[in-house]
Amino acid sequence: MGKDKKTKENKSKNKKPTNGIKPYSADRVIKWDRLDNTANLFPAIAGENATNVYRISVTLYEEIDGERLQKALDIILPKMDGFNVRLRKGFFWFYFEENGKPAPRVHKEHTFPCRYIRPNRNHSYLFRVTYYGRRINLEVFHVLTDGMGGINFLRELTYQYLRLSHEQLAEEGDALGEETSLDLDDSFVRNYKKFKPRGFERKRAYLIKADRLPEGEFGLMHGYLPIKETKEASVRYGVTVNTYLVANFAYSVYVACLKKGASDKPIRIAVPVNLRPYYDSITTKNFFMMVSAEFQPDDKEYTFEDVVKIIDASLKSQINKEHLEDLFSYGVGNQQNIALRIFPLPFKILAMRLVYNQSALANTSTVTNIGKIRTDEKYEPYIERFHANIAMSKGQYLKGTICAYRDDYVFTFSTIFADTSVERVFFKQLKEDGVNVSIETNGVFYR
């Protein structure tokens, strides 16, 4: 990869730099950047059945104009270096190269969410923007960034769209908001410690099996949970909201799938943890680590309160700086290992796929919390809510995503299962705990 960089820079030596996004030419310096440690895995395993694409969407109080949204994207993209790239193959590693093509085309949504992004059909970009009714959708290949980076981009795209739509906002100009980070630091490499032990779970977990939706369909079920009531419920159990909802997911699998029976395999929920607060990082690259909330049912019949306590203890034992550092330092250490670095990329891809296939079935599902989304107060009167969801992966065909905006949490189930037993138990438990849930779906479950 270093050779690639040197070659490109030498071609442009002593040339006057250009501003903005222009087609490739002999006088243009083409920037490149390394993938972060987590991102190296995604190109090796991504495909139609495991797209590694997530979606964050915003719903406005007005219908979306496609042409105006395209213009907003054309304005914002050149300012966001982390999105203005394409993926290239080097001899040893994948790397990012500045993309000199026009922004990808915005279009009205006509397919299911989180489809595989084919760069050759998308101006070589690794994200897509669609719209439907009052909703703007941003879908991102995880190689670019995690939820924080996605929120940054969608928020700025929304602001720009609103400035183009309303004269009273146009005077704000086209500058990015103060809360938007453009930092592209690889915080994994900067913070890892050498010689950390291996810390990844390999033992197989209980996997949900159920009738599936027709081929190609993708189900979404959004539950709107008042923040005040959800916090009150979690406080009664003595846990955080995140732990409460993860425990509810595990309990719902226990009730709906195991019928409150024993299992020789644990119910294990993967929970991504944002590492930025631990290291004072504002990077827009991936910077998270997975822990696993585990519940092993035996012959005893467990109450919901029992499961909450078990999940709470499981998460507390893992969500601390030392353990999280052990986990990501193991991965970075392998990447930095000279003996492993010398292998050409095809061998690394093969190795990463083998490791992924061995570990993919170690979790029953994933529940990710992208946190509370905040917007500039000038734009709040135009924004109704946000949603988020993640794609399927090997063995995990029902997943949960949490986000919050204003007075509501939104818990979104994404699935290819036609059966909604787990979801029904989940929302029933919330109602029993005094949370007045309202539910919305994309309609695939009721045909």
Image: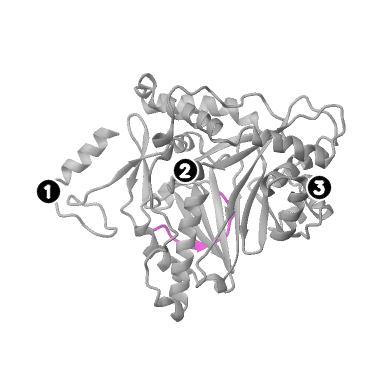
Q: Nearer the viewer, residue 108 or 231?
A: 231
What's the distance in space between the residues labelled 1 and 3, CA to CA?
Answer: 66 Å
Q: Quadrant of the N terminus?
A: top left
Task: State whether residue 188 appears in this view.
Answer: yes
Please, what is the three-letter code of the amino acid marked with disc 2? Asn
- In the figure, is residue 193 to the left or right of 132? left
What amino acid type is highlighted by mark number 3?
Answer: Val
The C terminus: image quadrant: bottom right
Left or right of 200 in this view: 243:
right
Earlier sequence position, callout 1 versus callout 3: 1
Residue visible at 52% across and 60% down in the picture = 130
Crowding near the residue tagged with mark 1, few <14, some 14–19, many ≥20 C-alpha atoms within 10 Å: few
Q: Which residue is mark 1?
A: 14
Looking at the rendered structure, the kind of residue marked 1 is: Asn
Across and down, in percent, residue 297 comes to 80, 30
Q: Secondary structure at mark 1?
A: loop
What element does badge 3 sit on? helix
Q: Residue furthest left?
A: 14
Magenta segment boundaries in residue numbering: 103-114
Q: Main secondary structure of the magenta part?
A: loop
Q: Which residue is mark 3?
A: 425
| Mark positioned earlier in the residue sequence (3 or 2) | 2
Circle 2 — which element? loop
Residue 344 horizontal/vertical position (percent) = 36, 25
| Label disc, if present, on residue 286 of the rendered structure | 2
Q: Residue at x 42, y 38 (%)?
A: 36
Give yes or no for residue 104 being in the magenta stretch. yes
